Amino acid sequence: MQSATDEELAKEIGREPGDRLCTELFRRYSKKIYLWSFGYTHEVEEALELSQEILAKIFRNIRSFSGRSRFSTWAYQVTRNHCLGELSKRRVRWRDRLLSFEEGAGSEAIEAEVFSRVDEIKDLERILDAAREYMSMDEIEAFVLHYREGLTVNEITKIIGCANATGARTLLQSARRKFGRLIEEKGFGNDA
């Protein structure tokens, strides 16, 4: 089953759940969902808690995956909606984080290399904190979805809720420019 696509696994689990299939899909997505959750919470324990809730929700609702998009797109939407719902419930507690997260030109090769090695960089939280100083929440989300998760502009358009692909492209261009400035000013390319 390791050679099956995520979409094939999801459809098979929807038809007939089995430990082997569920374990494989869990193996592929547990880290991604944790990192996506961490992008909203910026706290390890809360991201772990949310990612467990989200994984349970994904497996409970896997039959609702229609196959019209990539499974990763669907899983990200479930994650995003769950995290935003939790943030909304905890509004008072999270207000400062959300405000700082929404506030606001190195070469693309350096940016892509540094961002693709983010798992190897020990101080992920420092990079995320620095990115929040430079980029809006939508810019960070578009940047992560494109460069980290490999989603297309059209997929990003749907996830973020832009009116059209031009809006997503604009977000990516702005995020790329700001990320380049972050790389230059904070020197992340030199310490990894």
Image: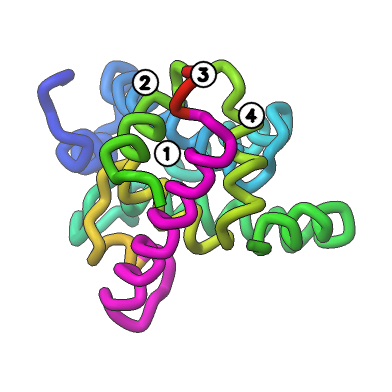
Looking at numbered disc 2 in the image, what kind of residue is underneath it?
A: Arg
User: Mark 4 or mark 1, which is nearer to you?
Assistant: 4
Q: Earlier in the sequence, mark 3 or mark 1?
A: 1
Can the viewer see residue 55 in this picture?
Answer: no
Picture residue at 51% right of the left edge, 63% below the top: 138
Q: Earlier in the sequence, mark 3 or mark 2?
A: 2
Front residue of 106/38: it is: 106
- Rate crowding at label 3 as few (under 14), some (14 to 19) or many (20 or more) other CA atoms within 10 Å: few
Q: Residue 48: give its label.
A: 4
User: Mark 3 or mark 4, which is nearer to you?
Assistant: 3
Circle 2 residue:
27
Q: Earlier in the sequence, mark 2 or mark 1?
A: 2
- Rate crowding at label 4 as few (under 14), some (14 to 19) or many (20 or more) other CA atoms within 10 Å: some
Circle 3 residue:
191
User: Mark 3 or mark 2, which is nearer to you?
Assistant: 3
Looking at numbered disc 3 in the image, what kind of residue is underneath it?
A: Asp
Relative placement, left or right, of 87 versus 35 is right
Residue reaching furthest to the right: 92
Q: Is residue 149 within the magenta segment?
A: no
- What distance separates the C-alpha of mark 4 from that of mark 2? 15 Å
Q: Earlier in the sequence, mark 3 or mark 4?
A: 4
Front residue of 122/157: it is: 122
Circle 1 residue:
59
Front residue of 85/92: it is: 92
- Span colored in magenta: 159-188
Picture residue at 21% right of the left edge, 34% below the top: 9
- What distance separates the C-alpha of mark 3 from that of mark 2? 30 Å
Looking at numbered disc 4 in the image, what kind of residue is underneath it?
A: Leu
- Rate crowding at label 2 as few (under 14), some (14 to 19) or many (20 or more) other CA atoms within 10 Å: few
